[in-house]
Image: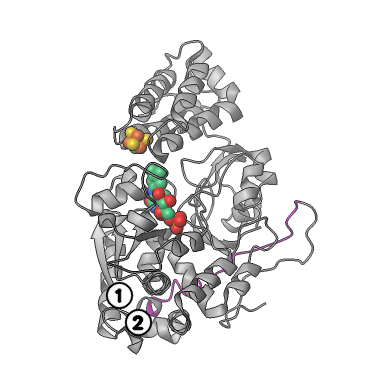
Amino acid sequence: MRNPHGAELFCARTPAWAGRIVLKMAELKLLLEHAHESEFATLRGYVARGGYEGLKAALGMDRQGVIDQIKASGLRGRGGAGFPTWIKWNGIPKEKNGTHYILCNADEGEPGTFKDKQLMEQTPFELIEGMTIAAVATQGDVGYIYIRGEFLDAAKAMRRAIDEAYRDGYLGQNILGSGLNFDLHLHLGAGSYECGEESALMSSLMGERGMPRLKFPHAPLPTIAGLFDRPTVINNVETYCCAPYILKNGGEWYATLGAATKNSRGTKIFSVSGHVNRPGNIEIEFGTSLMELLEMSGGMQGGRLKACVPGGSSVPIINAEACEKAIIGYEEMGDVKTMVGSGGCMFLNDHTCIVKFIWRTALFYARESCGKCTPCREGTKWMLQILTRIVDGKGQPGDDQLLLEICKQIDGRSFCGLGDAAAWPVEAAIRVFPEEFDFYIKNGRSMVETPLMATMSPR
Ligand SMILES: Cc1cc2nc3c(=O)[nH]c(=O)nc-3n(C[C@H](O)[C@H](O)[C@H](O)COP(=O)(O)O)c2cc1C
Ligand code: SF4
């Protein structure tokens, strides 16, 4: 099987679907096809491998034509929420009376996720081309890539690529002689998880504290008043990287990928980590099963599969039985009570203490809470306090129920999504593995611990 730009598809899909059982799918490299060729990170190497065909196609269309292709593709945001990309792009006002901004969320703070880092380091022109296509679709004038502060290699690769693109007329004034003007800047954050939340990202970019802003319906959408109160599109790195392939091959072609799912199209990169033999980024077609993703990662290491956090630390944990049924798709993952999220997929073996795992997760959210609203600021600290006394062997009867009660008070009642992200993992861990919490609270120790682990402090 070959994909439209001539490359081998690493796909051994058998045509028939037997109910929910997926028959043999394998890695399907679209964004990552040339990632390991160093030439692909140079403008010449990128163009030689079909790069910028998508932008050229977009420049031959009007604004609505580009948006229609994105709509036909079914592309949904890869940053976590899976929001339809075309709706954002279409929401930018058609009449232009000032600057339109194109923002790239390259903060990638979600624990377990490291795909954007690889994309920026190895396929930087996919991102630049994707953002330029977004500029065509929205009459964008200025773009910013907001990169996580620790990603120095990614920032250097992007800097080099942007300089090259300016030099050869792919950025700046009158791009490729088309009359399009688009300037692109890099901005390094300071490594705050909250700055990945889109309104906090914009605050940070404007020189304010990295805290979220009031949202729709209490404030206008960013497409109307975002960065510097101007119309703004904000998307994740991977989302933009899909655009060149959609414009080059057509939205309808893209929509054939993942067509077996309810409403998830294209490919998704999963950052696989945990107890697997071959951790790393793996690009798959939507509709692949979670167990196949595990197989592509070399299978389990050091024990049998016990649990999985498939979409980054904020998504609900599932047990091995749910993993067996899980099909990768935005709606399909909901069927097993979890999410695609940002694709940070952690597989855990049966020597993992879920209570300690979730204690470590709660520590992260308590530290990253920005403190603006009470449910998250106080709730994340209380959850951490209770989990800490449990893992210290001082848990009290009813602590698990108390944790669930706090989760309820945070979830849906916080000012931004970080509150929900802090509550979901704790709630899911207690719901899926109640016996582990019960045992730990009653006995003051983990039910899965070996004697050596028992001597080690969780902190
Ligand atoms: C606390 C928090 C952190 C987030 N961090 C990221 C991030 O690092 N990268 C990202 O793309 N989206 C992140 N998001 C989601 C963004 O707010 C936003 O939905 C996304 O950038 C939109 O792009 P997309 O439609 O292409 O997914 C975060 C959301 C929250 C609530
Ligand atoms: S939920 Fe509230 S305290 Fe938590 S990060 Fe968002 S605004 Fe800050």
Q: What separation in Å lies between label 1 and label 2 (alpha carbons)?
A: 17 Å
Q: Nearer the viewer, residue 459 or 245?
A: 245
Residue 49 shows up from this direction: no
Q: Position of residue 250 (x, y in %)?
A: 57, 77
Q: Which quadrant would residue 395 be assigned to in this image?
A: top left
Secondary structure, mark 1, is loop
Q: Position of residue 176 (x, y in %)?
A: 34, 87
Q: Main secondary structure of the magenta part?
A: loop
Q: Nearer the viewer, residue 340 or 131?
A: 131
Residue 404 shows up from this direction: yes
Tell me: residue 401, above or below residue 323.
above
Secondary structure, mark 2, is helix
Farthest residue, direction bottom: 177
Which range of residues does the magenta coloring cover?
Answer: 20-39
In front of the other: label 1 or label 2?
1
Q: Is residue 306 left or right of residue 372?
A: right
Q: Which residue is mark 2?
A: 43
Q: Which quadrant would residue 93 be assigned to in this image?
A: bottom left
Q: Please tell me whether residue 282 belongs to the stretch shown in magenta.
A: no
Q: Is residue 335 left or right of residue 103?
A: right
Q: Residue at x 29, y 63 (%)?
A: 144
Q: Nearer the viewer, residue 167 or 85?
A: 85
Say few, some or many: other residues with alpha carbon within 10 Å of mark 1 (under 14 / 14 to 19 / 20 or more).
many
Question: Quadrant location of the C terminus?
Answer: top left
Going by the numbered disc 2, the residue's amino acid type is Leu
Going by the numbered disc 1, the residue's amino acid type is Phe
Q: Position of residue 205 (x, y in %)?
A: 24, 54
Q: Which residue is mark 1?
A: 182
